[in-house]
């Protein structure tokens, strides 16, 4: 597996406004360092117990993103250094991220993960839930988080039309809430959609952040 070459090939396909999160879960630090040497600075991890040692050992100019389901009681371990939590999927979690960010005197970027897939096991807010929270200005009290946009995972399927519909729907929702609730907020501008097998569709449907693991680092043993 030639990580540098994989990165080069992926970058060739990314428009200028689309950033790459290299999802490195279950891959050893040596492999992340290969990506780092090739210029990659944004890495995504899904497990707190794996992320913390990687953060401690690897170069400090890496921008760490959390991309997996995060338990509220573990937020405290990553709050000192995490750049963005892309997978904020409940109000309770957002409140805990806010509290821990406050403890560390920082502001943590979050993306609201929206449930767009058909599988019931994928985490995320429903569209209606987010609209209700915005309507009731619930997030306004959370001064130590900045909501930078939305994230979603499409259904695991070969049906490209379905994947496209799910991404397209999320993009439409993004535009709607940007206009209705984040007008003039320059920071609300990220749509994190697209993984190894569907990122080209995601780009066509408005992605600004793709999250790619396998296509960079090869197969992993687990998900
Ligand atoms: C693992 C994972 C990815 C990367 O998936 P690949 O198919 O390996 O590119 C992206 N996003 C999330 C949320 C993930 O858990």
Image (cartoon, rainbow, N blue to C red):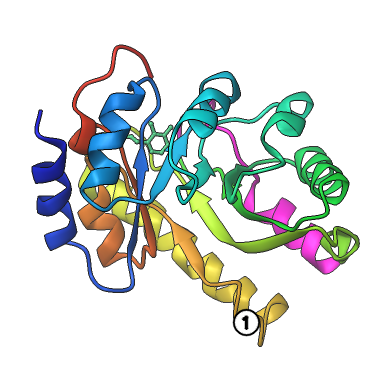
- Residue found 36% across the figure and 68% down from its top: 206
Question: Left or right: where does residue 133 sit relative to residue 146?
Answer: right
Q: Where is residue 45 in the image (x, y as percent from the top left)?
A: 47, 33
On screen, 35 above or below 135? above
Q: Where is residue 151 in the image (x, y as percent from the top left)?
A: 51, 52
Res. 15 visible in picture = yes
Is 62 in the magenta? no
> Which is nearer the eye, 223 or 104?
104
Quadrant the C terminus occupies: top left
On screen, 55 above or below 42? above
Q: In this figure, what is the number of numbered marks? A: 1
Res. 158 visible in picture = no
Is 123 in the magenta? yes
Report crowding for label 1: few under 14, some 14 to 19, many 20 or more residues within 10 A (C-alpha): few
Q: Residue farthest to the top?
A: 221
Q: Is mark 1 on a helix, strand or loop?
A: helix
Tell which quarter ligand 1 is in: top left
> Which is nearer the eye, 84 or 170?
84
Residue that label 1 marks: 179
- Residue found 78% across the figure and 25% down from its top: 73
Quadrant the N terminus occupies: top left
> Which is nearer the eye, 203 or 103?
103
Question: Magenta segment, which residues?
Answer: 118-136
**Quadrant location of residue 177?**
bottom right
- Residue found 77% across the figure and 46% down from its top: 94
**Quadrant location of residue 130?**
bottom right
- Cβ at disc 1 under 8 Å from ligand 1: no
Q: Where is residue 182 in the image (x, y as percent from the top left)?
A: 68, 77
- Residue found 66% across the figure and 35% down from its top: 78
Question: Left or right: where does residue 102 sit relative to residue 107?
Answer: right
Q: Where is residue 197 in the image (x, y as percent from the top left)?
A: 22, 40
């Amino acid at each position: 597996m030639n990580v540098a070459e994989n990165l080069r090939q992926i970058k060739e396909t990314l428009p200028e406004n689309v950033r790459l999160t290299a999802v490195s879960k279950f891959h050893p630090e040596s492999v992340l360092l290969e990506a780092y040497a090739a210029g990659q600075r944004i890495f995504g991890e899904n497990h707190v117990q794996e992320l913390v040692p990687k953060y401690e050992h690897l170069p400090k100019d890496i921008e760490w993103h959390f991309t997996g389901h995060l338990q509220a009681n573990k937020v405290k371990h990553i709050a000192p250094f995490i750049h963005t939590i892309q997978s904020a999927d409940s109000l309770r979690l957002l409140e805990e991220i806010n509290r821990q960010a406050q403890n560390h005197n920082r502001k943590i970027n979050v993306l609201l993960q929206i449930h767009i897939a058909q599988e019931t096991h994928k985490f995320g807010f429903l569209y209606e839930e987010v609209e209700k929270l915005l309507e009731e200005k619930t997030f306004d009290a959370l001064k130590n988080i900045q909501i930078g946009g939305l994230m979603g995972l499409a259904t695991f399927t070969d049906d490209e039309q379905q994947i496209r519909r799910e991404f397209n729907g999320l993009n439409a929702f993004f535009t709607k809430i940007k206009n209705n609730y984040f007008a003039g907020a320059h920071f609300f501008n990220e749509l994190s959609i697209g993984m190894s097998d569907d990122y080209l569709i995601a780009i066509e449907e408005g992605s600004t952040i793709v999250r790619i693991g396998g296509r960079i680092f090869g197969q992993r043993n687990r998900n």
